[in-house]
Structures are given as C-alpha cells and as structure tokens.
Image (spheres, grey):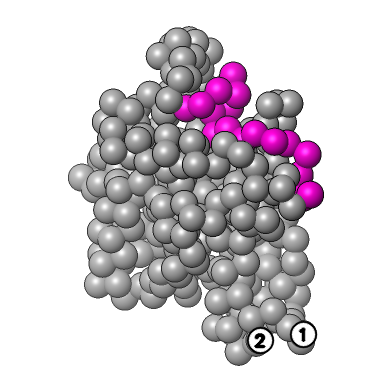
Amino acid sequence: MSEPYRVLSWGGGLQSTLLGELSAQGELDRVDLIVHADPGWERARTYEIVDFYSARWRKMGMRVEILKTGNIEVQGADEHVHMPFWTEDGGPLLRQCTREFKIRPIRRFTREQLGYHPSDAPHPPVGAVESWLGFTTDEWTRAKPSSVKYIVNRWPLLEMYFDRDMCKQWFKDHDLPVPIKSACIGCPYRRAMEWLEMRQQNPEEFEAACQFDDHNRKNPLAERGASTADALYIYREDRVPLREAPIDRDGEIERRKFRFYQPMFGCDTGFCGT
C-alpha cells in the first residue's frame, strides 16, 4: 500500500507551527504539503509568524502554500459564511466561517494536488490523505475523525503527549519565535482575557474589532428571513457592544477560573486556534 499524502493544516498558531517545525527538522515524518488558509483578517503577530516560518521551511525543502480565501472582515456576516455571532437570546449563530474560509479551500486544493477535480466525483480513494492537526493533551476532546473518507486525521502532538505549555517551551528552548493562538481579529469565540490583551497590546486591532462589532449589530440575515436574531454581538459574556464590555472584570474572573488549566478554544475543528 502506498504512503498517504501527508498534509499539515497550518493555522499559524502554536501547535500547528510546532508540527511544521518538527517535520522540517526531521523529528516527525516529512509532510508533503503545509497549507495555510488565510481568511484575510488574522492578527499582525500571526502574519509575522506565517511569514517567518514559511520562508524558513521553504529553505529547508518543505512545500508551503498560502491560500487567500477571502476577507472575513467584509464577509463575516454574509449568509452561508457568517461567524458564530452571539445573539440577544444567548446562543451563537451556526458557525460557517471555518468551513468556508478554512476547511473547504484546503480540501479543494489538496484534491487538486492528487489530480482530482476540487469537488466533483470521482473522489480520492479511502485514506489517500493524512491530515495533520495540532491538538494537544489539554484539548484532546477536539480530536474528531474526518467527515470525508479520503482523509484520515492525525494528531501527532497527542501521540507525543504534548500540552500547550510544552509547545511554548519547545520554541523557547530552540530560540525560535513563539506563535500566539491564531484566530480572526473579530472572532466571537475570544474570551475576555484575550480581548483585554488585545486592547492593551494592540489597540488598533481592538478598535478594528469594535468597528466590526458596531457595523454588524443589525443582523443582515434577519432582514432576509435567514435568522430570527435581530442583533449580533462578538462579545460572548453579556451580549453587549465590545466597546462597553466589562473586559477588565471578566478577564480577572477568567484568570481565577483558569488559573490551573487553559481554556479551550471555542472552535473544535482544528483549523483556527492551532
């Protein structure tokens, strides 16, 4: 049986970047493709990390591809591709952005590398692709099988019993830039601690998130009958505008709550927060 086509789904975050580096250094199997799907609105630090490691890995003989998949800042409230905005009733809208800006573009590109149409039958054979995802032991519940038969998901960091702190320490021990958690600037899954850090460290990014929140307050999906929620919010706790959110208070509550363990990223697909 031939070896599967190994693809690293690189979010630009801590864990998936470590997988890329370990593969490039020969500490793990060599992947055939490292692919990053760029939704057009990542944090500046994430773009710096993507630029640094893309250049580094290419010099090390790795194939790295950056897919420009749109601009989620503009499209994030569009029907069929919207973010998981919080509503006045509490629950978020169905998350569609990860599928449209990350999963589908990567799968379509991967199929083309195998000589298949990006979406139409015939499909690659069962198990033709081994997809590497950067989950660690502190988020093992996010590890789920692929939804398509030709892809088999693999989580090398779980096999190595790595947690997030071990990933960070690895980069420090090797004197390499440490990635932050990757996510769009206006992602509704951000916790108060993250909003607080963004406001303190990158006020221009925080302002962009506030403007995005203000701009999308009135749900365009409701006007088309596609949603019953009239108002949308990206701040999850109190369903209030981000500008007015008590992120200092909520951030301190979270620090106490998560003192002994890391909060898990809200998206469980493995394509955003890793």
Q: Is residue 86 visible?
A: yes
Amino acid bearing label 1: Ala
Tell me which residue sits at (65%, 48%) in the image.
Answer: 220
Element class at badge 2:
loop
How packed mark 1 is, by other alpha carbons closer than 10 Å (few <14, some 14-19, many 20 or more), is few
Asked if marks 1 and 2 touch (Cβ < 8 Å), the reply is: yes
How far separated are the C-alphas under marks 1 and 2? 7 Å
Q: Which mark is residue 117?
A: 2
Identify the main secondary structure in magenta: loop
Q: In which quarter of the image is the N terminus?
A: bottom right
Highlighted magenta segment, given as a residue range: 225-242
Image coordinates of residue 236 in percent, x first then y, are 58, 27
Amino acid bearing label 2: His
Can you say whether 110 is above or below 74 in the image? below
Image coordinates of residue 262 in percent, x first then y, are 50, 26
- Residue 64: name its quadrant: bottom left
Can you say whether 241 is above or below 169 in the image? above
Tell me which residue sits at (68%, 26%) in the image.
Answer: 88
In-image side of 43 versus 33 (left or right): left
Q: Can residue 60 be seen in this view?
A: no
In the foreground, 14 or 32: 14
